[in-house]
Image (cartoon, helix red, strand yellow):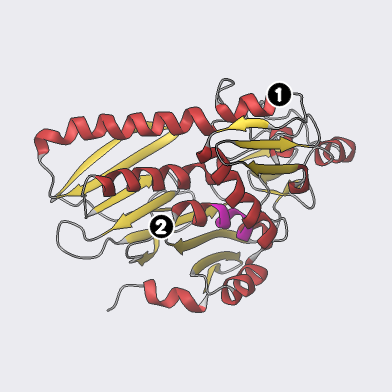
Amino acid sequence: MRRGLGADVAATVLDGKTMGTFWRVSVVGMDEGKAEALRQKVQAQLDADDRLLSTWKNDSALMRFNHAATTEPWPVSEAMADIVTLSLRIGAKTAGAMDITVGPLVNLWGFGPARQPVKTPDPQQIAAAKARTGLQHLTVINHAERQYLQKDIPDLFVDLSTVGEGYAADQVAAWLDGRGIKNYMVEIAGALRLKGHNGQGDLWRIAVEKPGDELGQVQNVLTPGDNGISTAGSYRNYYELDGQRFSHIIDPATGKPLTHKLVSVTVIAPSALYTDALDTGLMVMGADKALIFANEHNLPIYTLTKTDDGFKVRFSRAFAAYQPKP
């Protein structure tokens, strides 16, 4: 995970809850008398995003599509069509490592709205859930004045939790841009959008967390500039069952939680939606394939892999520009 580093006494900090997690926005140079009004506006925007994308609310726009036992085109908002279109493109780009239809497997392994399983799923259960997944079963249809999603199997389940935080961070950033705010940090759990400088006039500094049982340990400090940044990790959201530890990140190819030693990937790009869509796919790939992918696409990424001697740091060629100068 990443987080903003240190208290910025010259910034106004707004916060709240959304999507089952937290949000925080730091704004430099704003009138403190307007802070609560701005906080309420941001919260309203995030509540709208949650009503669009949540898999925990049965009346969200996404869950209404998931529950619809039809293969007919289903009308959706332009925002939903755009999110799914980008997700499908990233899915194809990563050869299916990032798959927004993996919901049945997420639910089977107890990381969705359903409860944690009381025993490890057997091969038959995994195969049955996998039969209900696959990017090839989902299509976005764009007409001049209307957009649709269409599934070719009625019980396809789309899970946008891998991109929701990034989308929300971009939406808040766009809202702040539209009001002429030039220096801010938007943080929606694992996804950030940054612009300008902090209250000391320096580029925003972001800490990459060191995995471990003790919270708040810093592995590295980054200066991402005017970009989005997000981290996918396998060391926080997990449970133990039948003597094994299961991560919330599912490999679409195997239908099972990850077993390799890569524990986190941090991605930097202009859009937090883009970084949020990519980081999970890169985690699924594992460190070697992720770094090959990043170097081929000139993508700044930073990886941590567990070894017998601690954590091994590796990063792509494009990443070096984002570490603070001595």
Quarter of the image where one finds residue 46: top left
Q: Which of 260 and 21 lies nearest the eye of the viewer?
A: 21
Q: Residue at x 45, y 34 (%)?
A: 49
- Amino acid at the residue labelled 1: Ala
> What residue type is disc 2 on?
Gly
Magenta stretch, residue numbers: 277-282
**Which residue has dot 1 on it?**
68
Nearer-the-camera pick, 49 or 257: 49
Q: Nearer the viewer, residue 143 or 131?
A: 143
Q: Percent from the top left, x then y, of residue 52?
A: 51, 31
Q: Which residue is mark 2?
A: 228
Q: Quadrant of the C terminus?
A: bottom left
Residue 167 image offset from top left, x and y in percent? 46, 45
Say which quarter of the image contains residue 30. top left
Q: Toward the viewer: 121 or 283?
A: 283
Q: How many marks?
A: 2
